[in-house]
Image (cartoon, rainbow, N blue to C red):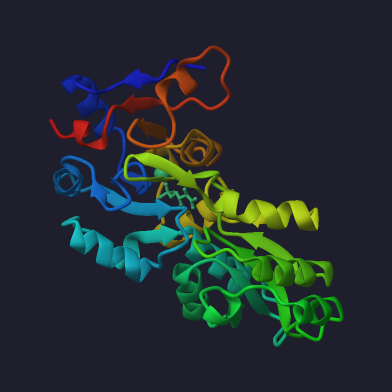
């Protein structure tokens, strides 16, 4: 495995690197920002790539926001981006359910463990759902719940899918209902299973962490539709029509972003050290996932 090229401060190296690619797939959390903290020179770097005529796609595993929500966040942070350029794991899951899985109605209803981003994208694909941000699920479990879940009288007969994403409001009731739906044969999907979420320069429990109790209790593993899933890469290629050899994935996490680019046979991958993965993780001998190049921060591409 070739050693990754360190580009920070390397003017000629950066020019050569940027000239190799026509398309850049951008991760968001840990690359552009850490929660509401925008990293230095991000809007200028994005503008520089646009001026060079590069095609940009924002590929995030963060399912708590929809494409429309991301457009608002980009605007708030002064980043020039279009809603159509966003491809999140919640959208990836919604189109997988509506266009690939295509369960016959009415048994195509989804029980959601997650936030509004998942709900909005299911709505955009006319996929019925329950659960999610519905406040009636954010309550203590009562004795009657055990009986009504066990005898399935509490279950919606049309639920055929359980979809789990990053959930900031997990509850024992939601886990118990989801487990009962899986026991009854519902398909188990996840937007993503990242273990941690970068925010405020630190790390917090990620989607994988909020889904883990259901995986353990049900004894089932979900099909994850976010990075590094190649179903997501195929959908992105289908939507944005680009030559993979001329595309580069930029991310902060080895086992999602960089693996996604490598398994997707993209022309290159760039790791940014402002998020989850540290350079020691890919500079060590014999590691499986190694980026083609790396920088301390994305703004280093802007000389
Ligand atoms: O837990 C999560 O969902 C992830 O940490 C978060 O979504 C990562 O987002 P990304 O870095 O792919 O933008
Ligand atoms: Mg990230």
What residue lies at 29% left-to-right and 27% top-to-bottom?
295
Image quarter (top left, top right, bottom left or bottom right) of the C terminus: top left
Q: Position of residue 280 (x, y in %)?
A: 44, 19
Left or right of 3: which side holds 160?
A: right
Total tally of numbered discs in the picture: 0
Q: Position of residue 76 (x, y in %)?
A: 19, 62
Q: Is residue 152 above or below residue 17?
A: below
Observer able to see residue 182:
yes
Left or right of 168: which side holds 33?
A: left
What residue lies at 21% left-to-right and 33% top-to-bottom?
301
Left or right of 81: which side holds 59?
A: right
In the image as oriented, which residue stretches furthest toward the top? Answer: 285
Q: For this rendering, which residue is in front, 234 or 136? A: 136
Q: Is residue 108 above or below residue 100?
A: below
Q: Position of residue 151 (x, y in %)?
A: 87, 81
Observer able to see residue 221:
no
What residue lies at 76% left-to-right and 72% top-to-bottom?
181
What residue lies at 59% left-to-right and 83% top-to-bottom?
128
Q: Is residue 57 above or below residue 298?
A: below
Left or right of 280: which side holds 39?
A: left
Q: Is residue 5 above or below residue 67?
A: above
């Amino acid at each position: 495995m070739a050693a990754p090229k360190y580009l920070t401060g390397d003017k000629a190296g950066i020019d050569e690197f940027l000239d190799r690619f026509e398309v850049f797939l951008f991760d968001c959390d840990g690359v552009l920002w850490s929660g509401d903290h925008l990293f230095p020179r991000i809007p200028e770097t994005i503008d520089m790539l646009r001026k060079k005529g590069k095609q940009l796609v924002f590929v995030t595993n963060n399912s708590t926001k929809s494409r429309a929500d991301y457009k608002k966040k980009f605007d708030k942070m002064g980043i020039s981006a279009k809603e159509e350029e966003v491809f999140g794991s919640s959208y990836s899951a919604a189109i997988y359910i509506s266009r690939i899985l295509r369960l016959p109605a009415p048994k195509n209803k989804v029980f959601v463990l997650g936030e509004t981003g998942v709900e909005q994208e299911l709505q955009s694909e006319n996929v019925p759902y329950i659960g999610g941000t519905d406040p009636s699920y954010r309550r203590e479990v009562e004795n009657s719940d055990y009986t009504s879940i066990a005898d399935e009288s509490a279950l919606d007969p049309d639920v055929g899918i359980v979809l789990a994403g990053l959930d900031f409001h997990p509850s024992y009731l939601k886990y118990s209902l989801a487990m009962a739906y899986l026991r009854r044969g519902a398909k188990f999907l996840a937007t993503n299973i990242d273990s941690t979420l970068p925010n405020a320069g630190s790390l917090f429990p990620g989607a994988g962490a909020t889904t883990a109790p259901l995986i353990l209790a049900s004894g089932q593993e979900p099909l994850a539709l976010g990075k590094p899933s190649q179903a997501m890469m195929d959908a992105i290629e289908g939507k944005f029509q680009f030559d993979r050899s001329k595309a580069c994935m930029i991310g902060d996490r080895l086992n999602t972003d960089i693996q996604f680019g490598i398994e997707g046979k993209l022309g290159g991958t760039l790791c940014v050290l402002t998020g989850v993965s540290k350079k020691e993780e890919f500079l060590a001998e014999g590691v499986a996932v190694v980026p083609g190049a790396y920088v301390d921060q994305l703004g280093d591409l802007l000389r």
